Image (cartoon, rainbow, N blue to C red):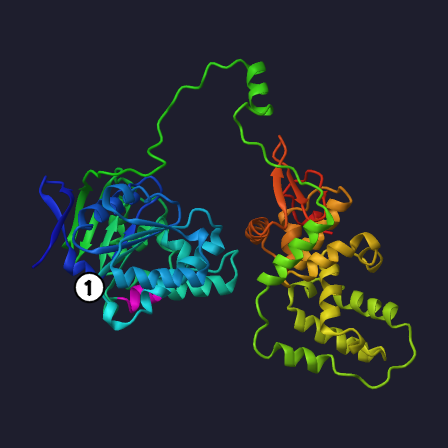
Amino acid sequence: MSVAIEMGKTQGGQPATLDLEELLATRLLVQGNSGSGKSHLLRRLIEQSAQWVQQVVIDPEGDFVTLADAYGHVVVDAAAHTEAALQQVAARVRQHRVSVVVNLENLETERQMRHAAAFLGGLFDVDRDYWFPMLVVVDEAQLFAPAAAGEVSDEARKASLGAMTNLMCRGRKRGLAGIIATQRLAKLAKNVAAEASNFLMGRTFLDIDMARAADLLGMERRQAEMFRDLARGHFVALGPALSRRPLPLRIGDVETNGRAGNACLLPLPATQPEDARGLILTAGANEPARAPAIRPTPADTAQLLAQLAASKPPPPPGQALVEAALSAPPPPPRPVPAKVELDVVLREVLSDPDALFRSVAQIYQDFLVRCRQHGINGRTLDMGGFRRRLASARAGLDSDAAAGPEWDNAQAVAEALTEDIQPVFLLLARAAHDRAPCPSNAQIARARGSRSPRRALGLLEHMEARGLIAVSADAWGARVIGIPALGWQTAPGNPDSGDEDTP
């Protein structure tokens, strides 16, 4: 039995219907600038088809969580799950045929891409017995299938793009019908957009997007200007599930609303300037206060180290063998002051501006080669010692500062952390110890071995969730970071200061 759902009305007032069974076989692309009614269209489609087919909504802004109350969708907070856990959740979603909204709003962009890729991969990889029909709606698809590399890592981009490509190219045989929506066709990967056979094109203003929309609808280039004049909620439909010819239509009403609602004018309160200053600079009576960093007792530090040791992941297979080979006893070295000369060679290695952005193994090999050139036995500094020395260097610490007695607890905590967190923790600890301004995102990213300041935000969230740091802000928006295990706290600092502030 064919199921036709009503999306709205045509210009002549006739019902504009969508063949749901045809959609399951041919997929859909929705395009429209912000404010064109794109999310309203998706909500109409989801509501009208909810009783007929299982649905999954990949929601980067948390706009569709309101479907839960009216239609029974289960909201999955992606920030509360690891990538591996999301894959398992996705498999159970297919097994039990539950409609869900995957809420990604509490994650920064790179982690949104990784978590979405993990969930889509879980939908894709289930056994054949669970290949039931399913609509997979992906809002803001240009985030998950970008046409070009951005500030996120190549690993995250490839994982997300691969998952979106599988959804649109190979998902049909597994019962997955991709419905992707984007603000910018030019920013959406062409191999993902090309797999859709149905199109709903809304208002857009950029020439490149209008031209691509006209090409996908089989219209002449001179007709592309019509997309600039479309009103909110008006779209042009084409495809086997919609219409064999370009069909203008207006999307119908919906029963649920997004949490943000529609923007409307609201008069400002009649507050005098002198009162307004007090309102924004003074904490209110019921305003939750952020707990300041508290200097812990030695037992607190020991407890944190025990927790970190218990949660530390096992080393990858073969790592012990590699490190054992690298730390094998070398031939007797010449009698030289090893510590001083090794520090000289390490500074020489790190004098290359790109050195800090390479892997530890690559930097260590460069270090060993330079040691041989200077006639020094570099293997007296094994891989573990080199990692500690490199973490201090990435944090901007010299050997004297790193060897001070007040750094014993800081080094003990840092050594219990993973390789990517160690230099960032030491950087923050040094600033907190000296009561220096809080490092900027650019400085934190550099200590992490990245050129992208945006990656620093996700790392700080991760460290705060583990209790390693406490992040707060002063009345002017400057960031303050405390180290609870050490009882230190930075001075306020601008998180958005540029690379020129990087030590």
The one of 168 and 214 positioned closer to us in this rendering:
168
The quarter of the displayed image where residue 349 is located: bottom right
Image vertical order of residue 113 relative to residue 341, above or below: above
Amino acid type for the residue under numbered disc 1: Ala
Element type at mark 1: helix
Q: Which residues are magenta?
A: 165-171
Residue 493 percent coordinates (x, y): 68, 40
Residue at the location (80% across, 84% down)? 330
Residue 44 percent coordinates (x, y): 22, 44
Quadrant of the snapshot with the N terminus: bottom left
- Please give left or right for residue 82 compared with residue 43 in the image: right
The quarter of the displayed image where residue 310 is located: bottom right
Can the viewer see residue 111?
A: yes
Residue at the location (58% across, 61% down)? 311
Residue 129 percent coordinates (x, y): 23, 71
- Please give left or right for residue 9 compared with residue 134 in the image: left
Image vertical order of residue 266 relative to residue 346, above or below: above
